Image (tube, coloured by chain):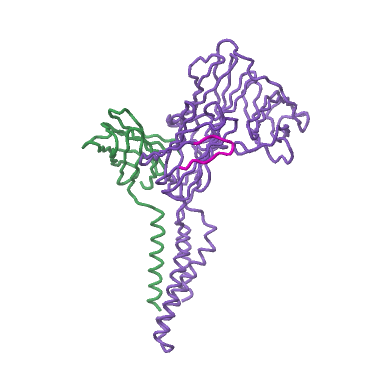
Chain colours: A green, B purple
Amino acid sequence: MRRMIVLAALVVAAVALFVVGRGSGPEPLRLTTAGAHYTATVLIGRPTTGRISVEVRVTSGDADGAALSAVMPDMGHAMPELVAGEPEPGRFVAEGELFAMTGVWDLSIRLTGPAGEETLTGKALITGG
Amino acid sequence: MIRALGALCLAVALVVAFAAPAAAHNVTAGADLRIAQTIAGTELTVVIKGTARVPGPLRIGVVAFDPVAGLPVNLEVRSLTDGRRVTALARAAAQPQYAQLRVEETGPHELRLRAGNEVAVVPFRVLVERGSAGDFLIYGGLLVAALLLVGGLLTGVLTGASARRGPAMLLAGGAAVGVTVAAMVIVFEPLLPPGEPDGAAPTAGLEGGRPFVQSRVDTVPARPAAGEEFTLRLDLVDGSTGRPVDDLVAHHEALAHLVVTSEDGRYFRHLHPLRTAPGRLEVRLRADRPGRYLAHAELERQDSGGQLLAGEFGVEGDAAGPGTVDRPASPRLRPAVPVAGRPTTIEVATQGATRPWLGMSGHLIIRSQDGSFLGHVHEMGSSGPGLRFTFSFPRAGRYLAWAQHATDSRIVTTPLTIDVTDPPR
């Protein structure tokens, strides 16, 4: 009898983990957005408040500069722009504070290059501090 | 044994309740998105049919409210995730044929409309409902029960009546858990909030509305001449961040309702400007007489209520025509002499059968004579012919009003003048 209860508890625990896991999604943020001149993927390993590292991979278009900024539309918060360095062609990295609190932020990626300047946007859910 | 099963079922119910993501979205999967556009000199409503799966079809039609004889409208849908584009040609008609495009994934897209030499870019999200955790538990529980019951039968057949009770109890208990979980979820799932569809924007469950919109009204050229076409432009800016406001939602089937009136009220247009860039709305129009014109824009940001923005512009030169001839109709008013602060019912005769326009069978735009007040009233529940509106005028004075409805072939505008008195002391 005890074995049966333990077995049933394990089954229920597995189901619970599956259900909860489906709802929360992966922790790192990966956002791909396509504009008229450029397509970029933003990667944030730890999308949290405070100092973070943000990587921008430009997969389409010839960008030679990238800068990131964020606003939180629900609260009317705006954060300063972070200018990214380019350790290798098409790959940009910026470090600093981009999100002041948890919630949904509009992320702007301003890209410059021979094709002109374009600002791509996307939404980022910040859940942890 | 029974207590243990009960505790397990309670745990499952709690897990399901906390796993369901809260928060609603402005666009739901399976529902049509309808956006009115004033383009190529005519009034159209673009209808994007919700899709049930991706990759899958996306049907778009263009409903005409003026006699435009199959006006061609070029459609281009672009994914904002991978940049993929698909195109089609639609023809505007009162009962349009739907053009069929194809979308490969959920998430943000934009629809580029081109009619005449005007272009509008309408952002939208492709959303697809995903299987809920409840469905998983219902079907999973029933599957487990079925497998265990079959296993129980086979165990009984293979071991005979003298078999040990242990395996039989184990299988029966497992089947009971499966059936109980499925039954509980069937009972409680309707009480749980629905999950977000695939492709929805992330939400954080915040409530309270977004900051106000600050608008700037310009004309191109800066000094339009009477009788010549010009562009009226609204630049929308977030009052807290200074960024362009690019989160307008469909508010009564339009990103914005723009009412342009001359100061004297003889000129009236109810327009639906085109989004030409983030935070920018534009519409082309023409005014036959010089003078001061007022622009009132009614719009709604995501997760917020409606807002009214006001601006003005001037038209120069000599009169190029009589303008709109103002022949105030005689509506039936109840009470016959409206009193400020009390409901007044306004009944307006219609020309022909009406059809819904902007989600309603009739609209009444009310402006105070000085232009400092603007109201937008919807027709409510008229059983017979004609339109019926109820409105409480805020102050005594003269009001200019325009009742509008759509027939099979056009939009009819009926100008009215209503005098409102102070309540008796």
> Taking B13 as reference, is A116 left or right?
left
| Membership of B94 in magenta stretch | yes
* The magenta segment: B90-100
* Observer able to see residue B149: yes
> Taking B346 as reference, is B219 left or right?
left
> Which is the main secondary structure of the residues drawn in magenta?
loop
Say which of A127 and B244 sits in front: B244
Q: Position of residue A26 (x, y in %)?
A: 35, 51
Residue at position x 73%, y 32% from top?
Answer: B349
> Taking A63 as reference, is B13 left or right?
right
Instruction: Specify the quadrant that holds the C terminus of chain B.
Output: top right
| Membership of B166 in magenta stretch | no
Residue at position x 74%, y 29% from top?
Answer: B331
Q: Position of residue B23 (x, y in %)?
A: 49, 48
Question: Going by the picture, which residue comes out furthest to the bottom?
Answer: B162
Which quadrant would residue B392 be assigned to in this image? Answer: top right
Count the labels in the image: 0
Which quadrant would residue B389 be assigned to in this image? Answer: top right
Say which of B239 and A37 sits in front: A37
Residue at position x 52%, y 60% from top?
Answer: B189
* Observer able to see residue B425: no
Is residue B423 shown above or below B160? above
Question: Going by the picture, which residue comes out furthest to the left?
Answer: A88
Question: Going by the picture, which residue comes out furthest to the front?
Answer: B69
